Image (cartoon, rainbow, N blue to C red):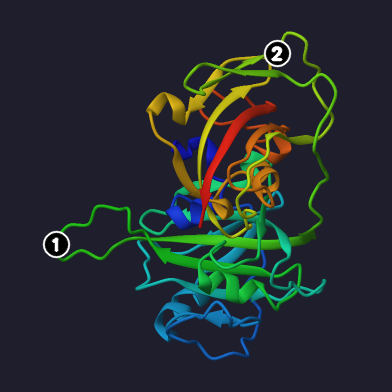
Amino acid sequence: MKKYWLTATTLGAIAALSLTACSSSDDSTESSSTASPTTAATSDAAVSATGQMQVGTDADVEVLKTIKWTVTDDVPTLEFDSPLTVTGSASYVATEGDGDVVADGDNVDLQVVAISGADGTVLASTYETGVMDTVPMVDGSLPPELYSTIVGNKVGQTLVFAQVDTTATVEDGDVAPAVFYAVTVTDIAVPPEVADDAADLPTVTRDDDGVPSIDFSAAKLPEGMVAKVLVEGDGAEVGADQTVTANYTGWVWDGDKFDSSWDRGEPSSFPLTQVVQGWQLGLTGQKVGSKMLLVIPSELGYGEQGSGDSIPGGATLVFVVDIESAS
């Protein structure tokens, strides 16, 4: 599957180690980490452990405590002397929140900025895309160290998270670089309403092999998101934390096709926790075997930044999705 469009903004990329980062600035307004951790560091974070203030080895947590959190033009940055690395994943609550307590199963809005520990360069940022990450707090949605310092703590908290970049090429004897993340828990999100049908949707037809085509000629852009069941399956319902195998084709509204598993000759598999929010909302609760038409507004897809050359900023996306299995 081409993750350039299915991966959910930045947090889907946390698991893939392609998240964001920030660089320091001379005109920043500094606000150093002030939280006094009340939980001892642990070497292996269990997903069931919640409300922790720091998770990781003692040495890695101490690395996180040396990083200075600063704010420039309302965007947080992390300041440290590079190169900087850790031995494994670790998370540290820099400042405690004062909002509602995040519970397991909540959908949480996060602002995320991440930095290369090798040279301090920004890798990605929700502030740049204009789309916050909305992540279901379920097993597998985030690395367990980060999950354990979000669930059980309050909205408004800021965290410094780090993990080793296992995708980097490392010469013999060299230390693998790390990626560092500035994470702010902004809200407990109420999932947007998803219509199960709308007037004048695009028309879907299929060839003899079941490959879909779409006709926008009589279609009218709906308000909000639509997840229409074209054919209902008879399998189990898809869970929010499951990995789905599906055939799909995606188009920009009233425009060109930009991706298709049918063109590649085989279905694709992906965790629902690591795809754009429109896919999470549209497929969760649907039955295996169902054939779906998804209309996804930009705020539930790729926002005002878009993705690559194929998906412009502000684009509404349309998908035909055949759910093959879920596990």
Q: Residue at x 47, y 66 (%)?
A: 162
Name above or below for residue 160 compared with residue 129.
below
Vertical arrangement, residue 65 with respect to residue 213, above or below = below
Amino acid residing under circle 2: Phe
- Name the amino acid type tagged 1: Asp
Q: Earlier in the sequence, mark 1 or mark 2?
A: 1
| Nearest the eye: 99 or 85 | 99
Q: Where is residue 124? Give x, y as percent.
A: 52, 46
Q: Is the residue marked by circle 2 packed among few (<14), some (14-19), or many (20+) residues within 10 Å?
A: some
Would you say 211 lies left or right of 313 here?
left
The percent position of residue 50, horizontal first and vertical second, equals: 63, 81
39 lies left or right of 106: left
- Report the disc number at residue 172: 1
Work out whether residue 12 or residue 289 is closer to the camera in this orientation and state it.
Answer: 289
Mark 1 burial class by Cα count in 10 Å: few <14, some 14-19, many 20+: few
**Residue to which mark 2 is pinned:** 216
Rounded to the nearest whole Å, what is the CA distance between mark 1 and mark 2? 55 Å
What quarter of the picture does the N terminus occupy?
A: top left
Q: Is residue 271 visible?
A: yes
SS under mark 2: loop
Query: Of discs 1 and 2, which sits in the foreground?
Result: 2
Measuring from the top left, give residue 25's x and y in whole percent. Answer: 57, 52
Could you say which quadrant of the image residue 141 lies in? bottom right
